[in-house]
Amino acid sequence: MESLLTSFDTTTNFWEANPAFLAIKEFKDLYSKDKTKRKATSSKLMWGVALLVDPHESNPLRNTRHGDKLQIIVEDFAHHLNTREHAIYIKLYEELCMTPVQRTILNLGRKLEERDEFLMNTHYNLDNAKELDTLISNTKKLKELYDVLMDELNKEQQGAGQTRGGRTESASEKGDL
């Protein structure tokens, strides 16, 4: 699946760099309601959304924990990004710009982060030792699932240069000529 995002240069205006997003009603409405010069406010918001969820290799925050990533974005970039208030744009971006495997990896990764944090903040005692041991032993299964999904994603991305019937794209089909 090819993403609607054509550029990940956050120094540019999001809408100018990625005009295909304006074909989507919700994004077009966001753009239309923005009265700032060159739609700067909504552009920053959309770059914030992209930085938050897009797994593209050009995303400098792609390997950052979700909570840390959100904090960096709000403090240093898109100050007005609010995940509750802007959930519609985040969800729509995920649906339009990510494959099902990428979305599953994103969601499982977030849950693994929550799980790690929970385990780190929970102290052992006689009342919870058995449950904590079970959680810790099950973590391996979840991480194995994550690895399987990552392998599937790698195969998916390697197949991006394939055409119907398994034929490899020619240089002109790839846009190299």
Image (tube, grey):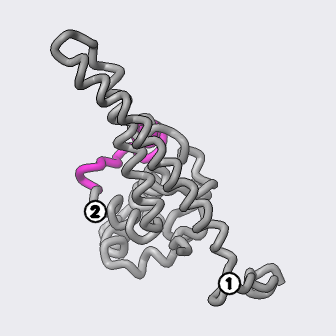
In the rendered structure, does residue 131 fall within the stretch colored magenta? no
Image coordinates for residue 64, horizontal then vertical, percent: 51, 39
Earlier in the chain: of badge 1 and badge 2, it is 2
Identify the residue at horizontal 79%, vertical 87% (top origin). Answer: 172
| Residue 16 occupies quadrant | bottom right
Magenta stretch: give its range: 69-86
> Given the image, on which type of amino acid does mark 2 rest?
Ile
Image coordinates for residue 79, horizontal then vertical, percent: 38, 43
Q: Residue furthest top?
A: 125
**Circle 2: element type:** helix
Mark number for residue 166? 1
Mark number for residue 48? none
Residue 10 in view, yes or no: yes
> Given the image, on which type of amino acid does mark 1 rest?
Gly
Q: Gap between marks 1 and 2, in whole Å?
A: 37 Å
In the rendered structure, does residue 77 fall within the stretch colored magenta? yes
